[in-house]
Image (cartoon, grey):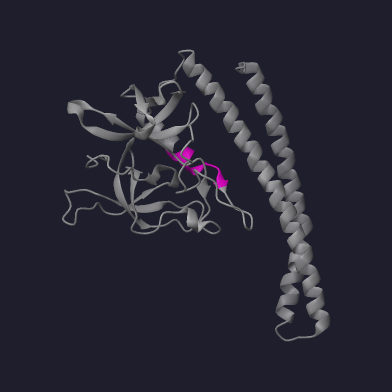
Amino acid sequence: MPLTAEQATLQVQDRLRALKSLIVEIDNERKRNEPNITNMIRLTKMSNDDKSSTLNHKLKTLYKVGLQDAVQEENLIRQALAKIQEIRNIRNERRIQARNAGNKETIRRGALMKMLQISAQTLPLFVSKPGEKIPPLCGCIPADNNYVAKPGDMVAALVKGLEDEENWILAEVVQFISSASKYEVDDIDEEQKDRHILSKRRIVPLPLMRANPETDGQALFIKGTTVMALYPQTTCFYKAVINGLPQTANEEYEVLFEDPSYADGYSPPLFVAQRYVIAIKQNKKVGGSSS
């Protein structure tokens, strides 16, 4: 049953209170752990000169305690991130309800570009636990074959434009029509205001999580991979080659877009967020030059 504005507000407030409590717990946990970390650093330096079994035993004990403390802190951080995602989901549900009621907000292009940038930067970060499998739609990991994107999800959509040319655009799912196995999507570009009915093969779901390069580098495209990437300050995807990988969770891919106006056929290096870099669809025309 759809949420009323009052219900959504109450749910957000409830999660904000829980989030505040978790942040306090995280801060207290870090303060509690600091003396143990300080002792570990001090004894580790001493062990360079003192190889006694007594010192090694003390260090092992401190490391064991430090590991337990780190696990506890990690659990609290994951709980806090989950609350943030719940708040995002509630707000997105309300936005979709408003759109379906005909109250779609008009966003100016500059604000839209900023919104897309923030959306990519705040996409949930997946940090795997030891031995944990990276889930679909994290980084470069594709969706399962039977996956169906939900209303409000962002996708790349292959649409026909003027003179029947085909281009990949950034779009938002309105609904999946299961009886026809087709998606109804809105062009994210407010200037177009186009709605399209497209088969599943013309839709590529965008990542739902960023991959952490420091723990899950295998969920990133390797250098030299041909991909589709959202050209900066546009809402269209174009063919590009990965030229550099993000080294931290906050960095972006460095890509070279195919562009015949340059002597070597590629644009200078440009940066594109993980959310807007996806595997190329085979046997389909991908958007042309970025102009």
Left or right of 248 on screen, residue 286: left
Q: Is residue 118 magenta?
A: yes
Q: Nearer the viewer, residue 97 or 104?
A: 97
- Asked whether residue 178 appears in the rendered view, the answer is yes
- The count of marks equals 0
x, y percent for residue 37: 74, 65
Q: Is residue 82 above or below residue 222?
A: above
The residue stretch that appears in magenta: 117-125
Q: Is residue 33 above or below residue 211?
A: below
Q: Nearer the viewer, residue 246 or 149?
A: 149
| Residue with the most extreme right position | 54
Q: Nearer the viewer, residue 104 or 166?
A: 166
Q: Is residue 282 above or below residue 7?
A: below
The answer to which image quadrant residue 264 occupies is bottom left
Q: Residue at x 73, y 49 (%)?
A: 27
The answer to which image quadrant residue 179 occupies is top left
- Asked whether residue 108 appears in the rendered view, the answer is no
x, y percent for residue 97: 53, 18
Q: In which quadrant is the C terminus drawn?
A: top left
